[in-house]
Image (tube, rainbow, N blue to C red):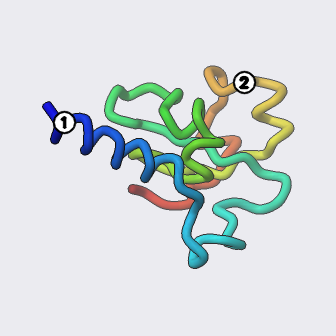
Amino acid sequence: MKYLLAYSALFAAVLASPPSDSSLGKKTCEGDQTVVCSDNGNGGLLSLGNILSGLLGESCSGGDVYCCDSGAVKQTGLINLDLNLQCTLNHVL
């Protein structure tokens, strides 16, 4: 039981820690674009990276990483966004 509690505390500390210096200053997308994560195991557009972007920075927890125009995301929303037409594929995880 002590080990489970200790590992849980360690995992929480890693998630809460700030990003390393090597990742500071690097942007996944251009200034007026929004990072959108897709296909995170469940086949849907909404994923942990889209919902908790403050916690994960601009990293997706899995799947493909797209750069979408912020205006298109605001206008259509994440559910109705057509990734192939309105976004560019940044990289595949």
The front one of 4 and 89 is 4
Q: Nearer the viewer, mark 2 or mark 1?
A: 1
Q: Position of residue 87 (x, y in %)?
A: 66, 47
Residue at figure coordinates x 59%, y 30% from the top left: 51
SS assignment at label 2: loop
In the orientation shown, which residue stands out farthest toward the bottom?
A: 22
Q: In the figure, residue 36 lies in which quadrant?
A: top right
Residue type at the position of mark 1: Leu
Q: Is residue 1 left or right of residue 36?
A: left
Q: Is residue 37 left or right of residue 62?
A: right
Residue at figure coordinates x 76%, y 33% from the top left: 73
The front one of 91 and 84 is 91
Residue type at the position of mark 2: Gly
Quarter of the picture holding the C terminus: bottom left
Q: Residues within 10 Å of mark 2 (few under 14, many from 20)?
A: few
Q: Position of residue 49 (x, y in %)?
A: 53, 40
Which residue is tagged 1?
4
SS assignment at label 1: helix
Q: Mark 2 to mark 1: distance in Å?
A: 40 Å
Q: Are marks 2 and 1 in contact (CB under 8 Å)?
A: no
Q: Quick one: label 2 or label 1, which is nearer the N terminus? A: 1
Q: Position of residue 48 (x, y in %)?
A: 49, 34
Q: With respect to residue 36, does 48 lie above or below?
A: above
Q: Is residue 45 left or right of residue 78?
A: left
Which residue is tagged 2?
77
Residue at figure coordinates x 65%, y 48% from the top left: 35
Quarter of the picture holding the N terminus: top left
The front one of 14 and 78 is 14
Q: Position of residue 57 (x, y in %)?
A: 61, 51
